[in-house]
Image (spheres, helix red, strand yellow):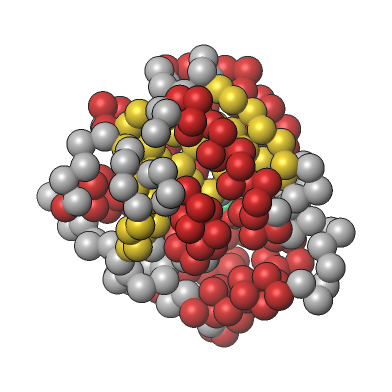
Amino acid sequence: MPHNEALSYSETGQGTPVVLLHGFPLCRDIWLQQRQRLSDRYRVITPDLRGHGQSPAPTGVYTMDALAQDVLALLDALEIKQAVLMGHSLGGYVTLAAWKLAPERFLALGLIDSHASADTEEGRQGRYQMVEKVTARGSQVVADVMLPRLFSPYLDIENPIINQVRQMILATPTAGIIGALQGMAERPDVTGQLPEINVPVLLLAGNKDQIIPLEKAQAMATVIPQATLTVIENAGHMPMLELPMTTTMAISHFLNTVVGK
Ligand code: MLT
């Protein structure tokens, strides 16, 4: 029986539960502005995934199923039978794994700058090389490699969100970074699962995403039966921080349409 990690999380507001999962190697704080606004109408829960933020960071490979089981265990602990689950990037991979494990638990899903494919062989090798570098030199290496690609190339280099994200990456335990890199490298292609998703799915993506191109969301929109594709113009991989109001409004509009208040 795999061991679930008890996740650290924030919870604000009342109403239909809306769970927002962050990406790699970040933490719940990326959702701060969305949490504040959406909690007027919803019970917003933002966990830190295993190995990130304030959650436990065991050694070992973090498979997408293990990360999803942690989220399902959190829903159990909060006595939530059904929720809306949305994930950014790695959080989106976890969202799809959670759907596969327990589709009855979800009213709607959201994939934010995410996709359903496995890594290419080149991508997988890149992850293992990064594991070696992080083992030798710590999380600083990931910050240096990822930061230039996380935002729209047009983002003002003085924008404080860049340093904010750098601090989040630096604060992520190396065991968490390594576990997530190995888990992402091993993750299966779940594209075949997309036509079976029988709840509404928000596909939200920045058109300047340099990590997961917009075409991924456009392709998923053609095979997910109840997909809503929303493109955030001039945002990169981090629309919730680059254009927080636009992102919140897109999520809010989707929630209003699919679950109401
Ligand atoms: C993320 O933003 O969660 C990761 O960059 C996703 C990935 O590396 O596949």
Residue under the point 81% across and 48% down: 234
Residue farthest to the front?
Answer: 40
Residue 142 appears in view: no
Judged from the image, the quadrant occupied by ligand 1 is bottom right
Q: Nearer the viewer, residue 231 or 119?
A: 231
Q: Indicate the position of residue 87 as horizontal and vertical percent values.
A: 48, 46
Q: Nearer the viewer, residue 132 or 90?
A: 90
Where 22 falls versus 261 (above or below)? below
* Quarter of the image with the C terminus in it: top left
Residue under the point 82% across and 72% down: 157
Where 188 falls versus 201 (above or below)? below
Instruction: Give the total number of marks visible in the rendering.
Output: 0
Q: Indicate the position of residue 60 as horizontal and vertical percent values.
A: 33, 65
Residue farthest to the right?
Answer: 154
Residue 11 appears in view: yes
Residue farthest to the left?
Answer: 1
Where 113 falls versus 161 (above or below)? above
Residue under the point 68% across and 70% down: 161
In the visual, does 66 lie left or right of 87? Answer: left
Residue 158's quadrant in the figure? bottom right
